[in-house]
Structures are given as C-alpha cells and as structure tokens.
Amino acid sequence: MVEAKVPPVASACKAAASRGHLAILIYLRSLNPPCPCEFSEVAVSAEMKGFWDVVRWSQVEMKRVAKK
C-alpha cells in the first residue's frame, strides 16, 4: 500500500475509467486512504467507451467492498 500525500478525489476514478486506464484505477484504490470510487459511475463511464475490463473490475470491486 502506498501512502497518499494528498487524498485522491472520486473524480480521479471516473476520469481513469472513461479512458480505460485499469492500472491507474487499481493504483488509486491501493492508496492509503483509497481513492473514494463510486463504482456504478466508474462502470457507466467505462461501458460508454467499451472498456469492458474496467467494467468487470468495477463490478468485482463493488462486491468486494460491499462484503466488508
């Protein structure tokens, strides 16, 4: 886990998703504290552009976070 010097904002996740940057999404969520992602918005942003790997990741993350 990487210590965040400045807390990331939720719009960073949406921006990464709309560009298909799965690695950046994974990085943002690995920060301490994790980037506050609105997974439904991430999925919609990615789906509109056809980034299906990001859509699937957001679905899995949404389920994982809900279990906690």
Image: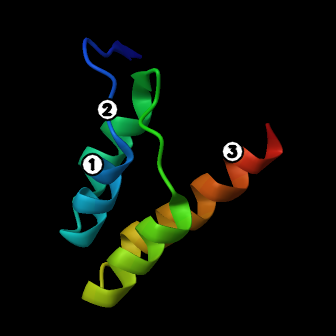
Kindly state the secondary structure of the residue where label 1 is placed. helix
At which x and y percent is residue 52? 38, 79
Q: Which residue is mark 2?
A: 8
Q: Residue at x 25, y 71 (%)?
A: 18
Instruction: Give the alpha-carbon distance from disc 2 to disc 3, as whole Å.
Output: 18 Å
The crowding category of the residue bearing disc 2, from other C-alpha atoms within 10 Å (few below 14, some 14 to 19, many at least 20), is some
Q: Residue at x 34, y 37 (%)?
A: 28
Q: Earlier in the sequence, mark 2 or mark 3?
A: 2
The dot on residue 42 is: none
Amino acid type, mark 3: Val
The crowding category of the residue bearing disc 3, from other C-alpha atoms within 10 Å (few below 14, some 14 to 19, many at least 20), is few
Kindly state the secondary structure of the residue where label 3 is placed. helix
Q: Which residue is mark 1?
A: 12
Confirm or deny contact between disc 1 and disc 2 (CB under 8 A): yes
At which x and y percent is residue 58? 51, 62
Q: Is residue 7 above or below residue 51?
A: above
Kindly state the secondary structure of the residue where label 2 is placed. loop
Amino acid type, mark 1: Ala
- Residue 6 position by quadrant: top left
Q: Which residue is mark 3?
A: 65
